[in-house]
Image: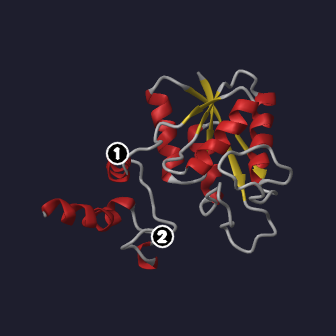
Amino acid sequence: MKIVGLVSGGKDSCYNLMKCLQNGHQIICLANLYPPSSNSTDEIDSYMYQSVAYMGVQLYSEACELPLYRREIKGKPMNVDADYKPTDDDEVEDLYELLADVRLKHPDVEGVSVGAILSSYQKKRVENVCDRLNMKVLCYLWGMDQSKLLDEIINSQIDAIVVKVAALGLNSKHISQSLVDVCFIVHLPIFLTSLF
């Protein structure tokens, strides 16, 4: 199946693209939503989108020699109900517009690669958008054990660099380090638990 890869600049969206290739899909293009230029930081207050590494997404496009479609996030989380219904000015509608634009330019694209792992909130909203556009969601990482996923990503030889910390045991001194270098810290509580 021909697909578009939603990329945030993070390891999960990149790794899910690798899983799509392993499963025989053809990546036609990449797509990214980025923070408004009026935002004072690289990160937005969003339930849906990770934006901290958005500036590196162009490098994905260049390295993969794939077209990149981008759209500024204009909406806010207006509808935070468990089941999403299209809502004016909601940030989810920015994703709809982005993928609708991709479909206009590439009508043969049938699927969307998404790096969501545990957030039902995100997954349901991507599914809603894809249902409206008659596209299939490819979310190979969904529900994976975090420790197993981390090991898989490291073994895949993705050279992931820490650009934000939001995990117990990590702090700002770990920013700019390789995921491999901080892996033991993240795995330490799991390792210690398995000893007892």
Q: Report the residue marked by disc 1.
A: 152
Can you give x and y, in whole percent of width and height, for residue 91 in the image?
A: 76, 54
Split into 4 quadrants, where in the image is the N terminus?
top right
Can you give x and y, in whole percent of width and height, for residue 107 in the image?
A: 76, 23
**Left or right, 147 with reference to 164:** left
Sequence-first disc among 1 and 2: 1
> Given the current orientation, which residue lies at the most extreme left position?
196
Q: Report the residue marked by disc 2.
A: 165
Q: Which element carries disc 2, helix, strand or loop? A: loop
Can you give x and y, in whole percent of width and height, for residue 124 in the image?
A: 63, 42
Disc 1 residue type (three-letter): Glu
Q: State whether residue 31 is above or below residue 134.
A: below
Which residue is drawn at the image coordinates 72% and 56% (left, top)? 34
**Left or right, 120 with reference to 98:** left
**Left or right, 180 with reference to 25:** left
Say few, some or many: other residues with alpha carbon within 10 Å of mark 1 (under 14 / 14 to 19 / 20 or more).
few
Split into 4 quadrants, where in the image is the C terminus?
bottom left
Which residue is drawn at the image coordinates 53% and 45% (left, top)? 115
Task: Report the number of discs.
Answer: 2
In three-dimensional space, the C-alpha distance between marks 1 and 2, rounded to whole angstroms, equals 20 Å
Say few, some or many: other residues with alpha carbon within 10 Å of mark 2 (under 14 / 14 to 19 / 20 or more).
few
Q: Which element carries disc 1, helix, strand or loop? A: helix
**Residues under numbered marks 1 and 2 in contact, where contact means CB atoms less than 8 Å apart:** no
- The quarter holding residue 131 reads top right
Can you give x and y, in whole percent of width and height, for residue 170 in the image?
A: 39, 73
Which residue is drawn at the image coordinates 41% and 68% (left, top)? 177
